[in-house]
Amino acid sequence: MPFTPANLDLARETIAKYPQKKSAVLPLLHLAQNQEGHITPDAIEEIADLLDLTPALVLGTCSFYTMFKLEPAGSLVVCLKTLVAASKPNDDNTPDASAPQCQPVKRLTQESGD
């Protein structure tokens, strides 16, 4: 879905704040994600048109930053990190190098009721 009329006006105001139109790509991606909950293909096309960019450049920017979601996400987002630097050598808490660093996390969606 393209921007709502109010968001389209806000997008044009945002673009006007920058000396180069392409500098507004991140704020417009935030605006699109806030409107739909994720970045839709239509939003990528519309942002590209507004900024005189190719959709590939907008998609590339979107996929580089982990804060942008290309598909609907659940209401809770879980990020797991391991801080190895805090472990002491030969410490029982030091992760095994052969063990996987990321553990699978069940994706929570509003539909699943979890």
Image (cartoon, helix red, strand yellow):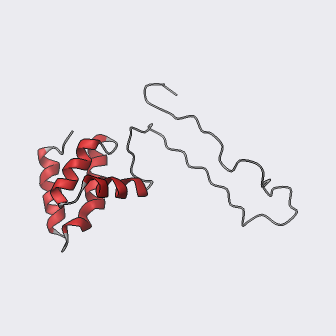
Residue closest to the eye, 33 or 98: 98
Residue closest to the eye, 8 or 50: 50
Taking the spot 61% from the left edge, 50% from the top edge, the residue there is: 80
Taking the spot 68% from the left edge, 60% from the top edge, the residue there is: 83
Percent x, y of residue 86: 73, 65
Q: Residue furthest top?
A: 112
Classify residue 92 by image quadrant: bottom right
Taking the spot 82% from the left edge, 66% from the top edge, the residue there is: 88
Q: Residue furthest bottom?
A: 19
Percent x, y of residue 55: 26, 52
4 to the left or right of 41 = left
Percent x, y of residue 49: 16, 54
Quadrant location, the N terminus: top left
Count of numbered circles in the view: 0
Is residue 3 positioned above or below 111 on the image? below
Percent x, y of residue 85: 72, 67
Taking the spot 27% from the left edge, 61% from the top edge, the residue there is: 25
77 to the left or right of 90 = left
